[in-house]
Amino acid sequence: MRALVALTGAVNLVLSALALVMIVRAQEFGASPSLIGVTLALPGGAAIAGAFAAPCLHRRLRTRTVVTGSLWLWACGMAVLVWLSSPLALGAVVAVTALAEPAFNVVVTSYRYALAPDRLQARTVSAARLIAWGVVPLASLAAGGLLQSLGARGTLVAYAAFMVAPAAVVTALPVIRQAPRTEEIPRPE
C-alpha cells in the first residue's frame, strides 16, 4: 500500500502539471487559443473512454500489469512529446496515455481498500489523498519553474526522465511484481 501511495504521488508530480506544459508548448508552435482548447480536449475525451474501460480492465488484468503498464506508457508518452511539433499531435499522444489513468486509479484505489481493515479505511484514504493530491500544487509550482528555466521542450525532457524512474522502480519492486489480484487479498480484520 505504501509503495502504491508513493508511486501515485510521484506520478501526479508530472501528470497534474502536464496541461500547463502542453499549453506553453502549443503556444511555442503558434497555436491559436481554440486549437489549444482542442489539444487539451483530446486527453479529456480519452480519459472518459478509459473510465468506461477501467472496470473491465480491473477484472481482467493483474494489478502489476495495470500499474507497470501505465507507468511505462506514461514514460514513453513523455519521451514522444519531446519530439512532436504539432499541437494536435501533442494532444493525440497525451490522449493515448490518458486512456490508462482511470484503470490505474481504479486498481490502486481498489487495492488500498482491499488491504486496509475497515477500522482504518478513513485513515488510509486520508493519508493516500494527502500524498496523491498534496503534490498537485507543488507540481504546478515545479512546472512553472521548469518552464521558465528550461522551456517547454526541456521540461518535457525532464518529465520523461523523471517518469522513467518510477516505471523502473515498479518493474523491479517485488511487492508490485508479486501483487495478487484485489479479490485474492484476504480481508484484514
Image (cartoon, grey):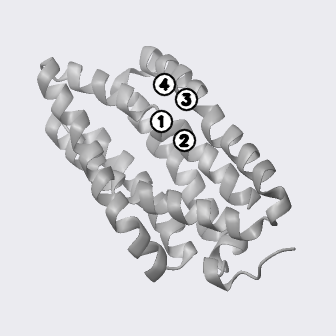
Q: Which amino acid does the dot numbered 2 rest on?
A: Asn
> As displayed, is residue 77 above or below residue 65?
above
The x and y percentages for residue 68 are 52, 67
The answer for how far apart the CA atoms under marks 3 and 2 are is 7 Å
The answer for how far apart the CA atoms under marks 4 and 1 are is 10 Å
Q: Which residue is mark 4?
A: 143
Secondary structure beneath dot 1 equals loop
Quarter of the figure with residue 26: top left
Characterize the local packing of mark 4: few (<14), some (14-19) or many (20 or more) Cα atoms within 10 angstroms.
many
Q: Which residue is mark 1?
A: 16
The mark nearer the N terminus, 4 or 1, is: 1
Q: Are marks 1 and 3 in contact (CB under 8 Å)?
A: yes
The reply, left or right, for residue 167 in relation to residue 92 is: right
Residue shown at 42% from the left, 30% from the top: 155
The x and y percentages for residue 120 are 83, 57
> As displayed, is residue 80 above or below residue 41?
below
The x and y percentages for residue 158 are 48, 36
Secondary structure beneath dot 4 equals helix
